[in-house]
Image (cartoon, rainbow, N blue to C red):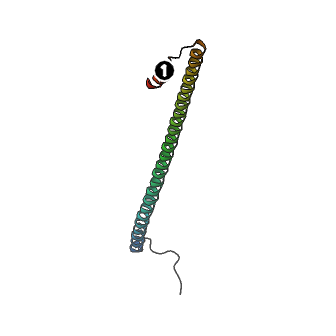
Amino acid sequence: MRLPWSGNPFGGWKTVLVFLAGGAITGAATGKALDFYCERVEQRLIQLERDRVARETRERERIETERIEREKQEIEKLEMEILERKRISREIALEEERKWYEEHGDDDFDYEDEDDEE
């Protein structure tokens, strides 16, 4: 028995068609699976980016709010210091005025009137 080394080149066209069809189907299925997988990965990456941007935005807003709050507290502190200085200055002025009247003998100075004007 002898095996032929070369066969009929046109005799296996049905086999070629079956392999071509099988390859096309396999390629199409693989392509669809890869498209689906890549789309899912892309959607996940997009969602991760959105989450990161949202986190950074919240962090910036939190930092800005804290900065504004600190500035408000500093302004309030300065305003309180200014009011305290004015109060002390007023008390000093009243005390000096009282001493002046004591030295110059004016007993008609009414201390109550000064406090009512405020």
> What's the residue type where badge 1 is placed?
Asp
For image coordinates 42% across by 60% down, the residue present is 35
Q: Is residue 93 left or right of residue 26?
A: right
Q: Is residue 73 above or below residue 90?
A: below
The residue wearing badge 1 is 110
Q: How many tags in the picture?
A: 1
Q: Is residue 18 above or below residue 54?
A: below
Residue 10 visible to an observer of this rendering: no
Q: Position of residue 62 (x, y in %)?
A: 50, 44
Q: Which quarter of the figure has residue 117?
A: top left
Of the pair 85 and 32, the residue shown nearer to us: 85
Instruction: Categorize mark 1 by other alpha carbons within 10 Å: few (<14), some (14-19), many (20+).
Output: few
Location of the C terminus (image quadrant): top left
> For the view shown, which residue lies furthest in the top direction?
104
> For the view shown, which residue lies furthest in the bottom direction?
1
Q: Position of residue 45 (x, y in %)?
A: 48, 55
Q: Which quarter of the figure has residue 25?
A: bottom left
Q: Which quarter of the figure has residue 70?
A: top right
Q: Is residue 36 above or below residue 79?
A: below
For image coordinates 59% across by 15% down, the residue present is 100
Q: Position of residue 29 (x, y in %)?
A: 41, 67
Q: Position of residue 66 (x, y in %)?
A: 52, 42
For image coordinates 54% across by 25% down, the residue present is 86
Of the pair 95 and 46, the residue shown nearer to us: 95
Residue 74 visible to an observer of this rendering: yes
Q: Is residue 1 left or right of residue 18?
A: right
Q: Is residue 49 above or below residue 20?
A: above
Secondary structure found at label 1: loop
